[in-house]
Amino acid sequence: MFSEEILVIISVVHLYVIAAIYSAAELYTSIKDYIDGRDKQYYLSRVKNSLFYNEAGELRRRTALVTGAAGAIGRKVVKHLSDLGYQVFVMGHGVGNLRHLGVKDIDSCDIDLTDDLKVSDCLEHWSGSLKRLDLFVSCHGIMASPKHINGNNIERHMSVNFFSNVFMIERLSKIIENHHCRMVFLSSATLHAAHVWDPNEFATVEAFGYYRNGYHAYAMSKSCLTRYIYLKSREEQRSIGMISAHPGIVATPLYDNVNFLWRVFIQNFLNHILWSPDQAALKLIDIAHSSEFFPGCYYEMGNAGEIAADPQQNAQFMSSVEQVLRQKMK
């Protein structure tokens, strides 16, 4: 049996190995995109010619909701969607002044996305417009934050990266009418480092309060998000299609809390070869409008895959999530 100290080391090393592999893969993809002429106009043209885009805008203006819109990737998502003719609603910290991106003041809600009451109030205020929501893009998240367990015994990464999205899905599903909506949730390739050493780890809600270290907590929260999207999409045939996607390793303030050496390496070396926020946003928007949008799937570099697990473990996981959700919805 591994000691906790060894598991901590393994989880961190595994995450760095994943970062190195994906950095190399994404550099190769960037070079190939350049050679093949896949620039900004290429992706925007693909979106404009997509069936989803044209059906959404046949009779009315397209509508989108973006969380984490003040972040590096979120800002670019908002800008491109605005340029594509979407009316964009934004939620999250620091979104109060995005007029230069085409967002009206009445369409922005500067709140903590873990504050369920404020999220509900915002969505209710916009409910008239969101009944015909075409696209939801979740860009908010935290990484490598210090240990913090809230009053409901939920670890902070889980609260921000996972449960805020679970709550959002539940609230939006009650607002959206029988109308086809696509949802894209930013996940991370680090989910491959989210070792579930105990097969029954999510048999109880206590697992959501576990903290090994900031890297592992981030990976676990993204793993839970991707797993939930996969399982939720299989529950029933629904007009809401949901996917999770790795946006690429993008040098953004998300990495401000990583260790000093890794931060310096990102800012002074990887920053020049990794995907830019603009590249990441364009690829996410492209996937969102693609004919190869497969609900429940997890996307890496444009390729769709599924996150499989034992059916009993999946049932335990969903039961624990529903238990937390019932408490949040009271």
Image (cartoon, grey):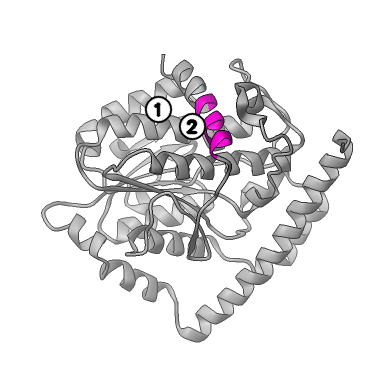
User: Any magenta on residue 312?
Assistant: yes
Q: Nearer the viewer, residue 232 or 262?
A: 232
Q: Earlier in the sequence, mark 1 or mark 2?
A: 1
**Helix or strand or loop: what does disc 2 sit on?**
helix
Q: Quadrant of residue 166?
A: top left
Q: Position of residue 204 (x, y in %)?
A: 61, 22
Q: Amino acid at mark 2?
A: Ser
**Mark-to-mark CA distance, 1 and 2:** 9 Å
User: Any magenta on residue 118?
Assistant: no
* Vertical arrangement, residue 204 with respect to residue 166, above or below: above
Q: Does residue 273 appear to the left or right of 165 in the view shown?
A: right
Q: Are marks 1 and 2 in contact (CB under 8 Å)?
A: yes
Which residue is label 2 attached to? 164
Q: Quadrant of residue 42?
A: bottom left
Q: Does residue 169 appear to the left or right of 23 in the view shown?
A: left
* Vertical arrangement, residue 190 with respect to residue 313, above or below: below
Q: Quadrant of residue 273?
A: bottom right
Q: Position of residue 190 (x, y in %)?
A: 65, 51
Q: Nearer the viewer, residue 289 or 194?
A: 194
Quadrant where the image shows the C terminus: top left
Residue at the image position 20 percent from the left and 62 percent from the top:
54
Instruction: Sort mark 1 into few (<14), some (14-19) or many (20+) by Cα contacts within 10 Å.
Output: many
Residue at the image position 46 percent from the left and 53 percent from the top:
297
Q: Nearer the viewer, residue 246 or 114?
A: 246
Q: Main secondary structure of the magenta part?
A: helix
Which residue is label 1 attached to? 119
Q: Amino acid at mark 1?
A: Val
Q: Position of residue 136 (x, y in %)?
A: 36, 46
**Helix or strand or loop: what does disc 1 sit on?**
helix
Q: Which residues are magenta?
A: 311-320
Residue at the image position 29 percent from the left and 61 percent from the top:
84
